[in-house]
Amino acid sequence: MNFTKKLAGPILAAALAVAMPLSGCAAWDNPMQMETRQLVDSLEAAGDPHQTQGVAMVTEISEVEPVDAPRQNALPVELTDADGYDVTVTDTSRILALDIYGTYTKTLRGVGLGDNIVGRTVSSAEASLSHLPVVTENGHSLNVEAILNLRPTLVIVDHSVGPSEAIDQIRAAGVTTVVMEPTRSMASMGQDIINVATVVGEPEAGRLLAERSQREVDEALSAIAAVKPDVPLRMSFLYARGTGGVFYLLGGTDGTQDLIEALGGVDVNTEHGIGAASPASPEALAEVNPEVFVMMNGGLESTGDIEGLLQRPGVAQTTAGTNKRVLSLPDGDSLAFGPQTGEMLLRAAHALYGEGE
C-alpha cells in the first residue's frame, strides 16, 4: 500500500481515511486485556477519598501485548512529516522510536514490531527493552553519535526530545527520519496509534490496537465513574527532578487535564490558567492548593520521596502537603496516552480510591 500522507497531528487524521470502528463488545482475549478486566471488576471505593492520607503509588504497568494480526509490511510508505520533509520509508528492520513518554515503542510492540527496536529513550523502560542501549543523555537530549552507531533504518521521533539540530544531523547522515506531531490526548489516542502504525507499514494492526486500546479506556472510565466521589478531588500534577530548579506545575498543554478528569478529579492547575509547565513557587502552590499531588515515580524519588518533597518551599502548606497525599505514577505511562492508557487509569483509580493495586 503506497500513499502520501501528512503526519502533522490532525492533518493525518483526515488524510489517512483509516476507519476505526470501535466495537461496543469487549473481547478480553489476551493476557493484557484479562488483567484490565480484573482491575475493572475489583475496583471499589474504600472510604472517603477526601480524608485519605499518604502516598499511593502505581509501581508497574503491564507490557503491551501485540495484537493478533498478520504482518502487512506495506512498504514503501511515502509521507510528508511534521517538519515538512518528504520521506519514503522502505526498511523497518532496525527502528529507533524516540519520544519523551516512550509511547512509540509501546505502539510498535503492540503492532508486532517490538523485536525491530534497536535502542530507546530513558522513558521506554519496558522489561523487554531493558537490554537495549539508551540513546538520550541528560534527560531527553538525543545523543547523535549513539544513534548513528546503532545503524537504524528508520528513526521515528518528535520534538518532545531534541534538540532540533540533533534531528537535523540524523537526517543529514542519511537515516530515514520521520518527525511526528502527536496530539497526545485521551481523544486522539486511537488516531495517534494508527499514525505510528501506518508509518511502519502496519495500518491494520494499528487499527486493531487502537480499537482495543479505546475499548479498555471506555471500560476504565465506566468503572471509575462508579467509584469517584460526588465532590471531585482537587488534583495538581507536580513535575520534579532532583532537589534543584526542576520543579514545575504542569497544565492542560501537557495532557494533565485529560488524565485528572479521567480519574474523576479537577485539574486545579488548568483551572488556574496553567497551560505549559510553570514554576511551582510557594505562591503558585498556595494558589492551586490541591488535595492530591500527581507525580511521576522517578520525580518523587528524585526529590527525596515524600519527606524530601515536604521540604520544598510551599508544599507542606498545601492541603495535599498537610496530608502527605500524593498519587505517584510510572514515568513512561502517566501522560503517554498510548496503548496502556486503560490499564494505567484503572491502576491509578485503585490507588486513589480503593485499597491500592
Image (tube, rainbow, N blue to C red):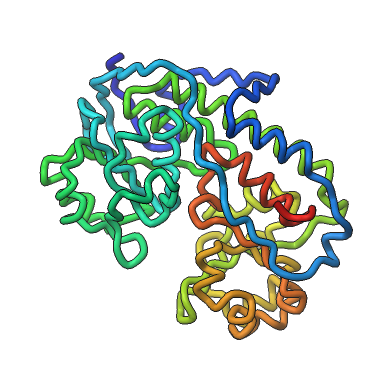
Q: Is residue 17 visible?
A: no
Q: Position of residue 7 (x, y in %)?
A: 36, 33
* Residue 251 figure quarter: bottom right
Where is residue 148 drawn, in percent x and y? 16, 49
Q: Is residue 233 above or below residue 81?
A: below
Is residue 149 shown left or right of residue 227?
left
Left or right of 207, for residue 234: right
Q: What is the x, y in percent for residue 178?
A: 27, 38
Q: Residue at x 26, y 20 (%)?
A: 75
Residue at point 53%, 54% (across, down)? 253
Q: Nearer the viewer, residue 294 or 59?
A: 59
Tell me residue 193's x, y (percent).
Answer: 46, 33
Above or below: residue 158 compared with residue 108: below
User: Between 146 and 257, which is closer to the camera in this rendering?
Assistant: 146
- Vertical side of 271 occupied by 278: above or below: below
Q: Is residue 309 left or right of residue 151?
A: right
Q: Name the image quarter holding residue 270.
A: bottom right
At 31% from the left and 39% from the top, the residue drawn is: 117
